[in-house]
């Protein structure tokens, strides 16, 4: 356990030099990043239902330290989710630079989402779901942390859509991105929970299938030629 975890939880007393205050704030932010990284590793190994005590033990510190930095389990979930979301956003932006069409951009988004979820299903579940009746999660923080994650992903879709669709498409931009996230999330989570078998699509095939549903729906399957 690091000795500095037992230090003061608030800023230095009034009158402290600005340099000392800045160093303390920098130290606190660095410590917070270390705890988030440790929590993510712990959840990856222990599972999405890991308790704050189990996460703290895996991080080599005490549960009280995590409460001091994150408030409660929902606060920790949101903090880990923001890191995952930031990494996902970077992957989407990098892929979007090579996308020539909106559909290619959507495929990049869906692929990044599935890759993130499939790389660590435990971490994905930790940042997107909350166990009912979990005494370590305050009900007021649950909807906020979960909503933030998917609202941010919806914004990632809406931003390029505005430039591609132009003016006069407020209804599409206002409703479609969140509807799209619902489809991506539900299809992706079902895919993630489906046991491996010859019938289960691979990650790339699933990403292309979801993108096709987003762009053209199931119209091709409903056409007379498709029915044979």
Image (cartoon, rainbow, N blue to C red):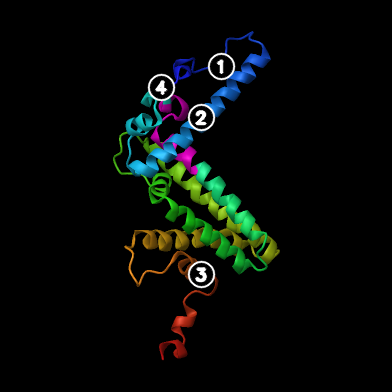
- What's drawn in magenta, residue-wise? 66-81
Taking the spot 54% from the left edge, 53% from the top edge, the residue there is 153
Q: Which residue is mark 1?
A: 11
Nearer the observer, disc 1 or disc 3? 3
Q: Are marks 2 and 4 in contact (CB under 8 Å)?
A: no
Q: Which residue is mark 4?
A: 1
Q: Mark 2 or mark 4: name the one nearer the start of the chain.
A: 4
Q: Secondary structure at mark 3?
A: helix
Q: Mark 4 or mark 3: name the one nearer the start of the chain.
A: 4
Disc 4 residue crowd, few under 14, some 14–19, many 20+, Cα 10 Å: few
Q: Which residue is mark 3?
A: 208
The Cα–Cα distance between marks 3 and 2, rounded to whole angstroms, is: 38 Å
Q: Secondary structure at mark 2?
A: helix
Locate residue 130: give its quadrant.
top left
Nearer the observer, disc 4 or disc 3? 4
The Cα–Cα distance between marks 1 and 3, rounded to whole angstroms, is: 51 Å
155 is within the stretch colored magenta: no
Quarter of the figure with the C terminus:
bottom left
Q: Secondary structure at mark 1?
A: loop
Looking at this view, is 45 or 23 the one in front? 45
The Cα–Cα distance between marks 2 and 4, rounded to whole angstroms, is: 15 Å
Taking the spot 33% from the left edge, 41% from the top edge, the residue there is 46
Q: Are marks 1 and 3 in contact (CB under 8 Å)?
A: no
Q: Mark 4 or mark 1: name the one nearer the start of the chain.
A: 4
The Cα–Cα distance between marks 4 and 3, rounded to whole angstroms, is: 47 Å
Give the answer, above or below, for where 80 lies relative to 107. Answer: above
Q: Mark 2 or mark 1: name the one nearer the start of the chain.
A: 1
Q: Which residue is mark 2?
A: 32
Disc 1 residue crowd, few under 14, some 14–19, many 20+, Cα 10 Å: few
Quarter of the figure with the N terminus:
top left
Q: Residue furthest left?
A: 133
Asked if residue 98 shows in the view, the reply is yes
């Amino acid at each position: 356990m690091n000795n500095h975890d037992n230090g003061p939880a608030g800023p230095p007393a009034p009158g402290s030099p600005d340099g000392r205050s800045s160093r303390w704030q920098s130290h606190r932010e660095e410590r917070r990043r270390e705890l988030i990284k440790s929590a993510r590793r712990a959840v990856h190994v222990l599972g999405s239902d890991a308790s704050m005590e189990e996460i703290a033990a895996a991080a080599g510190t005490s549960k009280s330290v995590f409460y001091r930095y994150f408030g409660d389990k929902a606060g920790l979930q949101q903090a880990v989710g923001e890191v995952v979301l930031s990494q996902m956003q970077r992957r989407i932006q990098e892929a979007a630079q090579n996308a020539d069409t909106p559909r290619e951009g959507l495929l990049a988004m869906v692929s990044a989402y599935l890759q993130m979820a499939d790389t660590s299903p435990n971490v994905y579940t930790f940042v997107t779901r909350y166990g009912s009746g979990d005494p370590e999660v305050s009900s007021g923080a649950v909807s906020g942390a979960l909503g933030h994650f998917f609202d941010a992903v919806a914004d990632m879709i809406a931003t390029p859509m505005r430039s591609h669709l132009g003016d006069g498409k407020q209804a599409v931009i206002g409703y479609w991105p969140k509807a799209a996230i619902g489809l991506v999330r539900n299809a992706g989570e079902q895919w993630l929970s489906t046991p491996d078998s010859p019938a289960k699509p691979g990650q790339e095939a699933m990403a292309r299938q979801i993108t096709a549903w987003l762009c053209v729906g199931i119209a091709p399957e409903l056409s007379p030629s498709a029915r044979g």
